[in-house]
C-alpha cells in the first residue's frame, strides 16, 4: 500500500466549480480586492463569529500586519513558542521586535506555566500558536494578558476551524492571523492569509494599510504596503470554506482512529500522544506524536510505503537564525528538545480510508513488535 502525505492532487482533482467562478471573475476584470475578496471576508467573519476579517496575501503578512497595527516594533518583546513554523518568530523580527521563545508543554503547545518568568518591562504582547491545529490554554493566556496589561495576538495559521467550547480559534485575541497555504485546513491554490479582529479601529487601519493606505483611488491617509489577497484565491477559499466542516470531520475521525489504534503503544511507553481535551475541537492539521526510535521507525514506514514528516526536527531556538534578534533561556527548553528527537507527523488527511489508517497503525505496531 502507498500512503502519500500530500493530498492536493485529490483535493483539486475536480476544478469545475472553481473554473466556473474564475470565468465569472475574468469577465468582471475585478482583479484587485473587489467583490470576490470582500464576499469571502464577510463569509469568513461570519464563520468565525467575529466582526471583521481582512484578507492578506499569506499568513506571514497577516502576522506582520497584526503586529504593525498594534504598534509593536523596535525595543518591544513578544512572547511566543519555540516549536512553531519560522514565520511566527520571523514576523516579530520583521517589525523590529524581539521574539522571546518559550518551551512547549506535553500537548506541543506554548507552556503557559513558563510564560510568567519570561515577562519583562519590555514585554508588549503574547503571541501563542494554535500548533498543529490544536489550541493552547487560551483562558490562562488571556488571564496573563489581562493581569499584565499585554496585547494578545493569535497565530491561528493552522487553526481555521478549531474551537474551544464552541468558540473559534482566532477570536480570543486582540488580533488573530490565519494562513491559507496549501497545507492548512482551509487552503487555496498558492498563498493566502487573513486577519480577524472585533476592534473597529484596528480593522479600519489594517484594511487600509494592506492596500497602500488608500482611502480612495486619489488619496492615501498614511503610508501602507500591498498585502492584498488575489481574487482568484478568494474564490478558491470561499468554495473551500463551504466544504471545511466535512473535511475537518473526516480528519478528526481519522485522528481518533489513530489514537485508538496506537493506545496500546502508549501504555507500553513506545508512543506518547498529546492529551486531547474534551471541549477542544482540533483541525488535525498535523497528527503529531512522540515515537521511540523515531528515525528507524520513519525509515521502516517509508519502506512500507508510508510517507511521514517531522514538524520540526529543530525548534526555533536551535536555528542558526536564533543567535540574533531572539531571547530564550537555553536551559529551560527541556520539553521541546526532548520532543524534537521523537516527533513524527503521520498522514491523517481527509482522503485516507479507514483501511489505510489501519495499515498505518498496524505498520507502526509491527515495527515495535519486531524490536521486542
Ligand atoms: C503556515 C504557518 C505560518 C505562515 O503562513 P504562510 O501563509 O505560509 O505565510 C505561520 N505560522 C504558523 C504556525 C504556520 O503554520
Image (spheres, rainbow, N blue to C red):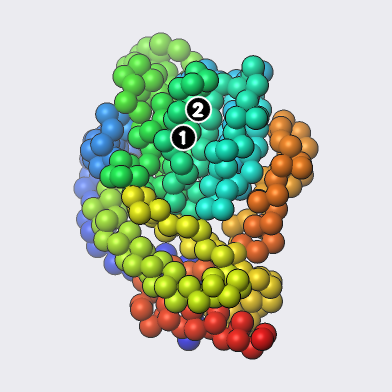
Where residue 255 sits: x, y (%)?
Answer: 41, 66
Label 1 beta carbon within 8 A of ligand 1:
no
Q: In this view, does 77 lie above or below 61?
A: above
Tell me what residue is drawn at x 38 percent, y 20 percent.
202
Tell me what residue is drawn at x 35 percent, y 28 percent.
197
Between residue 225 and residue 204, name the one nearer to us: 204
Q: In which quarter of the image is the C terminus?
A: bottom right
Tell me what residue is drawn at x 51 percent, y 58 percent.
274
Where residue 195 sits: x, y (%)?
Answer: 39, 33
Q: In this view, does 136 lie above or below 3?
A: above
Tell me what residue is drawn at x 55 percent, y 38 percent.
112
Between residue 351 and residue 191, name the one nearer to us: 351
Q: In this view, does 87 lie to the left or right of 262?
A: right
Where residue 179 sits: x, y (%)?
Answer: 44, 44
Q: Residue extending furthest bottom? A: 370
Is residue 284 visible from the viewing direction of this image? yes
Neighbor class of circle 2 (other Cα within 10 Å; few <14, some 14-19, many 20+) is some
Q: From mark 1 to mark 2, how far is it between C-alphas?
A: 6 Å
Q: In this view, does 118 lie to the left or right of 62?
A: right
Is residue 236 visible from the viewing direction of this image? no
Instruction: Check residue 12 in the rendering and tell me which mark sits there, or answer none.
Output: none
Location of mark 1 (residue): 140
Location of mark 2 (residue): 144
Q: Is mark 2 on a helix, strand or loop?
A: helix
Q: What element carries label 1?
A: helix
CB atoms at circles 1 and 2 under 8 Å apart?
A: yes
Neighbor class of circle 1 (other Cα within 10 Å; few <14, some 14-19, many 20+) is few
Q: Is residue 238 above or below residue 177?
A: below
Amino acid at each position: 500500500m502507498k500512503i502519500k502525505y500530500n493530498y492536493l492532487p485529490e483535493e483539486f482533482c475536480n476544478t469545475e466549480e472553481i473554473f466556473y467562478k474564475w470565468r465569472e471573475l475574468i469577465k468582471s476584470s475585478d482583479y484587485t480586492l473587489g467583490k470576490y475578496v470582500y464576499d469571502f471576508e464577510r463569509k469568513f467573519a461570519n464563520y468565525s463569529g467575529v466582526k471583521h476579517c481582512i484578507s492578506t496575501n499569506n499568513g506571514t503578512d497577516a502576522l506582520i500586519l497584526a503586529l504593525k497595527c498594534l504598534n509593536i516594533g523596535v525595543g518591544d518583546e513578544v512572547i511566543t513558542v519555540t516549536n512553531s513554523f519560522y514565520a511566527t518568530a520571523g514576523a516579530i523580527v520583521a517589525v523590529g521586535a524581539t521574539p522571546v521563545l518559550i518551551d512547549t508543554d506535553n500537548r506541543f503547545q506554548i507552556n503557559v506555566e513558563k510564560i510568567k518568568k519570561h515577562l519583562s518591562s519590555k514585554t508588549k504582547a503574547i503571541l501563542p500558536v494554535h500548533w498543529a491545529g490544536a489550541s493552547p490554554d487560551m483562558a490562562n493566556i488571556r488571564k496573563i494578558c489581562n493581569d499584565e496589561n499585554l496585547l494578545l495576538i493569535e497565530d491561528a495559521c493552522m487553526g481555521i476551524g478549531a474551537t474551544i467550547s464552541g468558540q473559534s480559534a482566532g477570536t480570543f485575541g486582540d488580533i488573530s492571523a490565519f494562513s491559507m497555504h496549501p497545507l492548512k485546513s482551509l487552503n487555496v491554490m498558492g498563498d493566502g492569509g487573513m486577519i480577524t479582529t472585533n476592534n473597529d479601529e484596528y480593522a479600519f487601519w489594517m484594511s487600509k494599510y494592506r492596500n497602500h493606505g488608500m482611502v480612495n483611488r486619489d488619496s492615501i491617509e498614511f503610508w501602507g504596503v500591498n498585502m492584498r489577497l488575489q481574487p482568484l484565491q478568494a474564490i478558491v477559499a470561499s468554495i473551500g470554506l463551504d466544504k471545511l466542516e466535512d473535511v475537518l470531520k473526516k480528519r478528526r475521525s481519522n485522528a481518533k482512529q489513530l489514537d485508538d489504534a496506537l493506545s496500546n503503544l502508549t501504555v507500553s511507553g513506545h508512543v506518547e500522544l498529546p492529551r486531547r481535551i474534551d471541549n477542544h475541537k482540533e483541525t488535525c492539521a498535523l497528527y503529531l506524536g512522540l515515537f521511540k526510535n523515531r528515525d528507524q521507525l520513519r525509515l521502516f514506514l517509508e519502506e512500507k510505503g508510508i510517507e511521514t514528516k517531522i514538524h520540526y526536527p529543530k525548534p526555533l531556538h536551535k536555528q542558526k537564525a536564533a543567535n540574533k534578534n531572539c531571547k530564550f533561556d537555553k536551559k529551560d527548553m527541556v520539553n521541546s528538545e526532548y520532543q524534537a528527537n521523537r516527533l513524527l507527523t503521520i498522514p491523517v488527511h481527509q482522503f485516507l480510508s479507514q483501511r489505510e489508517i489501519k495499515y498505518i497503525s498496524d505498520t507502526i505496531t509491527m515495527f515495535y513488535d519486531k524490536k521486542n
